[in-house]
Image (tube, rainbow, N blue to C red):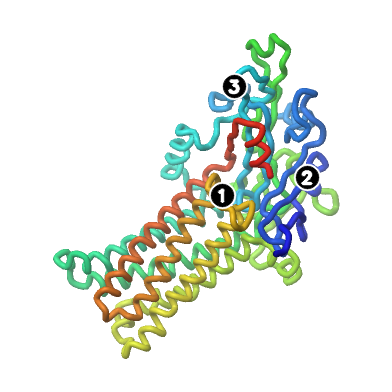
Amino acid sequence: MPPRNRHFHTREPFQHDNRLTLERAEGPFSFLNPTRAHFNHSGSVSKETPDDTAISRDSVDNAADHEVPKRYSESNVPAKNVRFLWRSRDNRKGRHPLLVQRPKPGEEAYFVTPRRTSDPREVLKTVVKTFTCFPIWDISWLVAFVFTWGSVVWVLNGFFVWLPVVAPSTEFDGEIYYGGGVTAFIGAILFFETGSILLIFEAINANNTGCFGWAVEQLFDDDDDQKRGVARLRVVANRHHCHHHHRNRHNFVGRPSISTVPEAQPPSKGGKLAKRAWQWFPSWHDLRTHYLHEFGFLAGSAQLFGATVFGISGITALPGIIDHLTPQWRLNAAYWIPQVIGGSGFIVSSTLYMLETQQKWYKPAPHLLGWHIAFWNLVGAFGFTLCGCLGMAYKNSGAQYEAGLATFWGSWAFLIGSYLQLFESLNKNPVEEVSTDQDFAVRQS
């Protein structure tokens, strides 16, 4: 088995940032780019802090020229160690994960950070945002929004095709024929295909330069720590220190916001600030040297292939088409087999997205939200593929029951995964928390 990849083929993140140095990179496969990397900041905060701390005095000096609120009720949790993590999925989604080690009783805390993202108050806050916040300029949110509504349509389809088999008394005229056919067309063509195309655009317009996304300020407070001479730094999410596309509400994907501070923007080859523009298609050189080594692009391509083939079933499911597909081999060729092939594409895509979040290809990563998103999408993909396989024996009453059931539970799995993706897209600064030195070292490696 080839060794795990420890270097980027092209486009190493933060290679133009003199404050950040690549310590190590990790990925499941040697022929693909690493999916996570660890960067050391130039210098350390103080002699008491570890050498591998991700924050330095440089950051404090840079942040001093910008207004950062001095008190945050959600940013007053003490931390012993802090490290910035770069992960390919998080970067593509415009997120800036922070790993925090909380101090034990009696230990010094040199940092103050926001609460962990899994805190019930933070979870509730983001859940509320999924119903009240609609950043249509953020392609990552738009992908999740489209897939969520597409999954809702497929859940309705599951009711239309399975409920009449389970409870025949509930069936109304044309429920399977019209209700099932129309919802299959809408779900496959309008939502799955559109969402898959947006996934490709998201992958080829990802921020490959790297984005720190956090601001650091000197903490001035009249507490016991200050009286004892223990200096603290507060790490806060600051939109002016992020140059991901979602900060610019005036374009879909492209130039960062004009409010982004100069030191946070990546320089171009000429030494001036970079002005990234939207690209519809990558060049052949970029495709060959970079995108074919990227999990996000490969998974999105498999998703688009699966959605396109699956779309054939969506079209042939329409009333007036499916009832003319006789004998059985025509129905299989135009309706059921495209479901099997399309569902297989979804399986490949979801598997790649899962592997992208894992430190090792055989080691699950249930502590990461992206892993759960890919897992539930994988369950849904198996459901849709199984439906197509069973559908070719549709004259069998047991196969008809199981095919409808597979669509039903597969649709719900897609809905869970899509909603979690919507949640993910609105949480741009996740904070992961550990309590021991060993856990802190393990989560880094």
Task: Determine whether the residue tagged by mark 3 lies in a helix, strand or loop.
Answer: loop
The residue tagged 3 is: 71
Mark nearer the viewer, 2 or 3:
2
- In contact (CB < 8 Å): disc 2 and disc 3: no
Gap in angstroms between the C-alphas marked 1 and 2: 22 Å
189 up-or-down from 74: above or below: below
Q: Indicate the position of residue 16 as horizontal and vertical percent values.
A: 81, 47
Foreground pick, 188 / 343: 343
Gap in angstroms between the C-alphas marked 2 and 3: 33 Å
133 up-or-down from 29: above or below: above
Foreground pick, 324 / 251: 324
Point 76% across, 57% down: residue: 8
Gap in angstroms between the C-alphas marked 3 and 1: 34 Å
> The residue under label 1 is which amino acid type?
Ala
Task: Determine whether the residue tagged by mark 1 lies in a helix, strand or loop.
Answer: loop
Which quadrant of the view contains residue 178? bottom left
Checking the image for residue 397, the label placed there is none
